[in-house]
Image: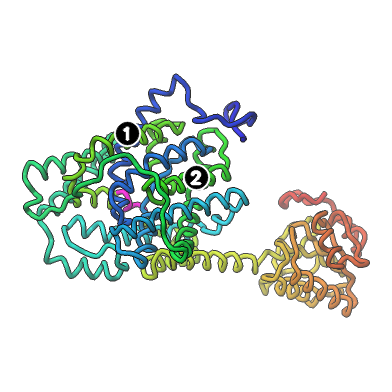
């Protein structure tokens, strides 16, 4: 195992095995313990709310904070990332299981356990085979849109809860929205009072005293109000009886067909967590000067999700908001996670009676305020100003998650990611170089001011791997450069391949076609700055032939040009071509 042995400024040196709870010392143990108490006050209310979003009993959310959290804390490389069920994961669980069983039923609960185990296996496989890079296909605009769509779906459910309106929380977004609108005549006044009061306290509290666990304050005060004034008799719904006792270990027993049906949703859950969790882990590691291991973190997510599935919890992801809260209070270890596990264990053994009278409108307010930033309004405005195409991608993902459901939404997200990737790869920079190797003019604009590097010679740089998506673009660019009007006919073409890092079969066929076409037009082909690995592939595809390879573009111009290569122009950007 790889670990941290020493930190010097911004430089982190590795050496020796990674120890458990790196960064923990006797000096910072009190601070970390206090951070754990703060995290407990944040996590318990949210996990109860997220369990309800997922269609699960409160114990599923609480049990996720015990055994899974301990397993995660002892394996993960990140000192700060908090693993817990979050809004996106909860919505995915609800949408994916809703068609397989009735929310709240025993079979639904068992399916949630099995789904967590499958997600854990997916994480573990990604760690073993180093497949974490797959999550990078979910770009920032895609994540903004996908998570924003899930947040809007959750917000509708929580708004109904805050108003005291009964809707089917497991229904599709449009059905829930219609149910909320048509049920406005059943709004409960006391529920509205509790909700408004809770929102005001949460928003004002975050603004003026962020260190206070306002979510816990809201639940405690609202529960006292419900008990003292007997609000349950006035139509205010409450959490109800919560099963007491520690988590029990068991393996979910379901048909193999059900296991197979859960695989797509488990993969979607893993992809979303990988896309967000690994990025958060890396950013906090860089910020606070310690190394992280993506594969180790994936294994931690895998082991903790399996632990959740066998101990009564449900799928865990990375919690950005809780991680940020721990960073703000100065936590730099995973000790707070262990404190939460101990505190939650004591709660489920001795204190579940305290949870029974928590009003549902207050829970809805806590969750609604927590997920409101996930709508991504500011991010969408920024995308619109900076890159409208990226805005469109985010908007399509948003609508896909809302109207088609999270699973279909994640498929749409991946398809859009591939389309965006292909679009960019199919339009690489293709430049006729000046004698100073500056890509001053592209071949694509019609008003190109020159068509040759020197009379009779064109040095052409193709700035991308040559593969199926841009092979035709490569052919067209070469032909256009040779056919362009010029006082001296082109007799030599030098292909600068420094930026070509790879070539596939389609690209090799296009390359061969270009060489053949140039030969038919009595134009000699030369190469420059060819990478050793690319040269091997060119030889493998039998593309080198009698082609002359130059080490630099200057050498090519000196050997082939009608004039001597002029001295380096210092008024242009520096070139690596020496």
- Give the number of the disc on residue 343: 1
Q: Position of residue 422 (x, y in %)?
A: 61, 67
Q: Main secondary structure of the magenta part?
A: helix
Element at label 1: helix
Where is mark 2, residue-wise? 303
**Res 62 quadrant in image:** top left
**Residue segment shown in magenta:** 370-374
Q: Position of residue 491 (x, y in %)?
A: 89, 72
Measured as percent of width and height from the top left, residue 521 is found at 87, 79
Q: Which mark is residue 43?
A: none
* Residue 299 painted magenta: no
Which residue is painted at 50% across and 66% down in the image?
Answer: 389
Q: What residue is shown at x 75% (from left), y 69% (from top)? A: 507
Answer whether residue 550 is visible to the viewer in this image: yes
- Quick check: 44 above or below 264? above
Q: Quadrant of residue 506?
A: bottom right
Judge the density around disc 1: few (<14), some (14-19), many (≥20) Cα neighbours within 10 Å. some
- The count of marks equals 2
Which of the two residues, 455 or 317, is positioned nearer the viewer here? Answer: 317
| Residue 356 screen position, x and y as percent | 18, 45
Helix or strand or loop: what does disc 2 sit on? Answer: helix
279 on left or right of 483: left
Q: Are marks 1 and 2 in contact (CB under 8 Å)?
A: no
């Amino acid at each position: 195992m790889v670990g941290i042995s020493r930190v010097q400024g911004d430089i982190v040196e590795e050496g020796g095995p990674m120890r458990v709870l790196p960064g923990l010392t006797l000096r910072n143990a009190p601070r970390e313990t206090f951070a754990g108490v703060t995290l407990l006050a944040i996590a318990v209310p949210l996990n109860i709310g997220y369990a309800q979003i997922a269609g699960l009993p409160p114990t599923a959310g609480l049990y996720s904070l015990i055994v899974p959290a301990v397993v995660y804390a002892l394996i993960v490389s990140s000192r700060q990332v908090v693993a817990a069920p979050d809004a996106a994961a909860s919505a995915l669980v609800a949408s994916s299981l809703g068609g397989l069983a009735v929310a709240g039923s025993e079979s639904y609960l068992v399916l949630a356990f099995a789904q967590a185990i499958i997600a854990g296996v997916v994480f573990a496989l990604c760690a073993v085979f180093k497949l974490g890079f797959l999550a990078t296909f979910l770009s920032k605009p895609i994540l903004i849109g996908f998570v924003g769509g899930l947040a809007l779906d959750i917000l509708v459910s929580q708004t109904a809860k805050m108003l005291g309106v009964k809707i089917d929380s497991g229904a599709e977004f449009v059905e829930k929205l219609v149910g909320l609108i048509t049920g406005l005549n059943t709004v409960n006044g006391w529920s509205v009072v509790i909700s408004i009061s809770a929102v005001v306290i949460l928003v004002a509290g975050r603004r003026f005293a962020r260190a206070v666990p306002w979510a816990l304050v809201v639940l405690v005060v609202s529960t006292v109000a419900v008990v003292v004034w007997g609000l349950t008799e006035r139509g205010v719904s409450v959490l109800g009886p919560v099963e007491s006792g520690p988590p029990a270990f068991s393996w979910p027993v379901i048909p193999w067909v059900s296991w197979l049906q859960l695989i797509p949703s488990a993969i979607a859950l893993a992809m979303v967590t990988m896309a967000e969790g690994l990025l958060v882990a890396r950013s906090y590691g860089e910020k606070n000067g310690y190394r992280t291991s993506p594969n180790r973190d994936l294994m931690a997510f895998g082991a903790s999700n399996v632990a959740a599935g066998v101990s009564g919890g449900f799928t865990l992801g990375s919690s950005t908001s809780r991680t940020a809260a721990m960073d703000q209070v100065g936590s730099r270890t995973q000790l707070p996670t262990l404190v939460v596990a101990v505190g939650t264990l004591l709660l489920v053994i001795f204190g579940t009676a305290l949870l029974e009278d928590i009003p549902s409108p207050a829970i809805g307010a806590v969750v609604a305020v927590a997920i409101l930033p996930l709508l991504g309004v500011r991010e969408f405005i920024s995308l619109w100003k900076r890159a409208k195409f990226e805005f469109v991608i985010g908007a399509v993902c948003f609508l896909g998650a809302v109207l088609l459901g999270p699973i279909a939404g994640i498929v749409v997200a991946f398809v859009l990611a591939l389309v965006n990737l292909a679009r960019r790869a199919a339009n690489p920079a293709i430049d006729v170089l000046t004698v100073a190797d500056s890509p001053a003019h592209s071949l694509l604009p019609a008003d190109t001011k020159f068509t040759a590097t020197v009379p009779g010679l064109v040095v052409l740089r193709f700035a991308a791997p040559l593969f199926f998506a841009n092979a035709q673009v490569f052919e067209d660019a070469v032909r256009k450069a040779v056919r362009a009007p010029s006082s001296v006919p082109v007799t030599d073409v030098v292909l600068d391949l420094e930026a070509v890092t790879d070539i596939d079969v389609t690209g090799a066929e296009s390359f061969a076609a270009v060489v053949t076409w140039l030969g038919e037009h009595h134009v000699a082909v030369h190469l420059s700055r060819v990478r050793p690995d690319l040269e091997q592939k060119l030889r493998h595809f039998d593309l080198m032939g009698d082609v002359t390879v130059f080490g630099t573009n200057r050498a090519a111009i000196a050997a082939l040009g009608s004039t001597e290569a002029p001295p380096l122009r210092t008024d242009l950007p520096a070139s690596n071509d020496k």
